[in-house]
Amino acid sequence: MRNILTDRDFRAGFTEMMPANLGLTPFGLVCGVGAAAAGTNLLGALGMSAIIFSGAAQVLAIQLLSAGAPLAVIVLTCFVAGLRFLMYSAAMAPYLRPLPPRWQRALAFLLTDQAFAASIRRFDAGGHPREGAMHFLGGGLALWSWWQVTNAVGFFAGNLIPPSWSLDFTVPLCFVGLLVPVLRTSPALIAALVAGVAVILLDGLPMRLNLIAAGLAGIAAGTVVDTMEARWKRR
Amino acid sequence: METTLKIWAMILIVGALNFVSRLSFIAFFARREMPILLARALKFVPAAMLTALIVPMIVLPGDSASPETLPRMAAAIVAAVVAWRLRSPLGAIVVGMVALWIGKAIMPV
């Protein structure tokens, strides 16, 4: 444990997650407020943030719980909202392959939108797989710990922030900070463009399936452009 | 008491399903070769999925059409430029928020 905490890459991953933590703070507060409003006790609220550990799923679960939805409906809806984790898992798989199963399971538990985006960049930058894994662990733990704090504060303090401040906007802004460095190649730009248009066009899909459908459309578009580019260069 | 039971059943089932989703392909491809086309496609997961997550939060905030859409779009573009030029995620959040507040103040809603 001691050599994990003093590890250079662990510390770098931990520190680099701070802006994302700041951006996600209003989201964590909202989750805590919602949990309290839905009638859970502190243990239930922290159970959600610590075990489910997904803002989108927590918000859906809280809404459905308050509306008196059956357990099966809540479970199915949250599962659909978490389908993107399948994609993150697949994209992470080649990088985590050299690691022992114990590490794969630990990092999978910490696999969120932010940890995924941050650590895949670190893995792409090269180096030993252990360095990337340490960076991932640092970032993932930073996010997990702060998520518990923000959820608990939201649970106790309630809606302290006036809605007119629009602080919920820090959530997309923290994603923008993660997205922009990814858009270095034209296929990546096309993938983003197609996904962005598709998510609006498919807004009518139930259970927010437009997210996953738009993601798949963007990935397909990026892959096609990438393949075409590779052929052009070969000529 | 019944509510508590339901909440904990939900936490454990949803938590388990989330973990299974997160581990799925990491475990699957730990012992198998990944097809080349799939590996090529997966390079675009970050660009496509992050955009799919961001755009609805900017263009379709909340459940109803929001008068904030225009200032939000403008602020997101400003934040993207800051993230690109200064390579600072923190700068993007701070400048983006300030841009949104200015936008809301000057744009008639």
Image: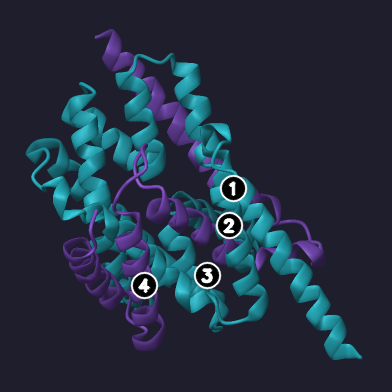
Chain colours: A cyan, B purple
Residue type, mark 4 in image: Gly
Say if mark 2 contacts mark 3, CB within 8 Å: no
Q: Residue at x 85, y 86 (%)?
A: A232
- A178, A199: nearer the viewer: A199
x then y, percent, for residue A125:
53, 83
- A208, A107: nearer the viewer: A208
SS class, disc 4: helix
Mark number displayed over residue A120 = 3
Residue type, mark 2 in image: Val
Say if mark 2 contacts mark 1, CB within 8 Å: yes
Q: Give how far apart the Cα atoms at labels 2 and 3 are.
A: 24 Å
Camera-nearest label, 2 or 4 = 2
Q: Residues within 10 Å of mark 1 (few under 14, many from 20)?
A: few
SS class, disc 3: helix
Mark number displayed over residue A191 = none
- A96, above or below B4, in the image: below
Q: Which quarter of the picture shows residue A51?
A: top left
Quickly name the residue at label 1.
A201
**Horizontally, is A33 left or right of A157 in the view?**
right
Q: Give how far apart the Cα atoms at labels 2 and 1 are.
A: 6 Å
- B69, A64: nearer the viewer: B69
Does label 4 or label 1 sit earlier along the sequence?
Answer: 4
x then y, percent, for residue B105:
16, 63
Q: Give how far apart the Cα atoms at labels 4 and 1 are.
A: 36 Å
Mark number displayed over residue A197 = 2
Pinpoint the chain carrying mark 4: A
Q: Residues within 10 Å of mark 4 (few under 14, many from 20)?
A: many
Question: Which quarter of the rendered picture does the C terminus of chain A lie within?
Answer: bottom right
Residue projecting furthest to the right:
A235
Pinpoint the chain carrying mark 2: A
